[in-house]
Image: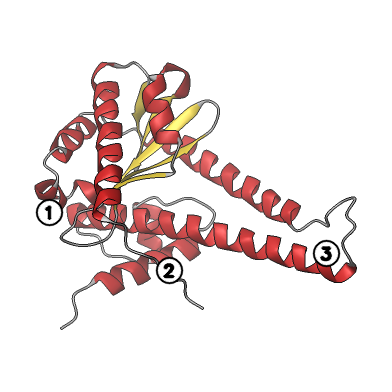
Amino acid sequence: MKKNHTPPSIEEVEALNREALAALDLLFRELQTSNAVIGRGTHAIVFDRSGMAPELLAAITQKNTIALFPSDIGYWLPIFCVTSDNKHICLSVTDLLSDNNIARFPILQQLKDLVSRIPVDCTLDAISTDISNRLHAAFDQHFLNMCEPVEDSELSTEELALVRQWRAEQAQRDAAQAFQRKAIATAHAFDDWSATTGEGLTFSTFVNTFGYQDKDGKQMYEAVKRILDAAWPQA
């Protein structure tokens, strides 16, 4: 059964937008004054974690995605998605920097200007890809651990089976939600890239030219295709 989501209240939207804009303000300062920026890959800005301001580090690692909620369209628009390890923070800027969304949130022009000043160094893509692949591996292991029997339990065989089933279903829900958020952000990023380059969406273009190198490439390509097809206005 499909889960129904309750729309956020006006107060919740305003609070979350303030939180996202505060994170943006911290990011502006980091991009302007910090030596923590290693460079910009094809899709992500790479930071040296040890050199980042603690306030920004806390703001962008509490959530995988920082998003704004424009009331006129009624759904969240990701500003950037974050992946990290103990050395690097990779911040993937998405299609929120399009002209339409800058018109909704003029402050985003400042982010676009700051990002555009960082020259692209494709060799940095290896860092973000390696982090993403290691996160996938860690999640796979977490999924396996969740499916292990409950140790030292007084539950019956049937009850243990229910616990294992619940753990497996919860892990699948968590994985599906994480993939959904990543797919939305990737679709935004591809659409922005496509508008700039004129390249259409094929699997070869998605992987080789756009440069999506994570191990879920085929699945992500299909998800991005569905998202872009669904978002196209109906005649």
Q: Is residue 166 visible?
A: yes
Q: Looking at the image, which residue is at 47% across and 50% down?
A: 213
Disc nearer the start of the sequence (2/1) = 1
Q: Name the residue under label 1.
A: 100
The kind of residue tagged 3 is Leu
Which tag is nearer the camera, tag 2 or tag 1?
A: 1
Q: Mark 3 points at which residue?
A: 160
Residue 53 place in picture, x, y as percent: 38, 19
Q: Looking at the image, which residue is at 63% across and 58% down?
A: 171
Element at badge 1?
Answer: helix
Q: Give neighbour class at mark 2: few <14, some 14-19, many 20+ (Cα, 10 Å).
A: few
| Disc 1 to disc 3, C-alpha distance | 52 Å
In the rendered structure, the answer to whether residue 53 lies left or right of residue 139 reads left
Element at badge 2?
Answer: helix
**Quarter of image, res 172:** bottom right
Q: Looking at the image, which residue is at 38% across and 23% down?
A: 55
Disc nearer the start of the sequence (1/3) = 1
The kind of residue tagged 2 is Glu
Residue 27 place in picture, x, y as percent: 29, 28
Residue 222: give its label.
Answer: 2
18 over 142 or under it: above or below = above
Question: Hey, which residue is sitting farthest bottom in the picture?
Answer: 235
In the rendered structure, the answer to whether residue 114 lies left or right of residue 56 reads left
| Disc 2 to disc 3, C-alpha distance | 36 Å
Task: Check if mark 2's residue and mark 3's residue have beta carbons within 8 Å.
Answer: no
Disc nearer the start of the sequence (2/3) = 3
Taking depth in this image into account, of 29 and 228 the one nearest to the observer is 29
The kind of residue tagged 1 is Asn
In the rendered structure, the answer to whether residue 82 lies left or right of residue 95 reads right
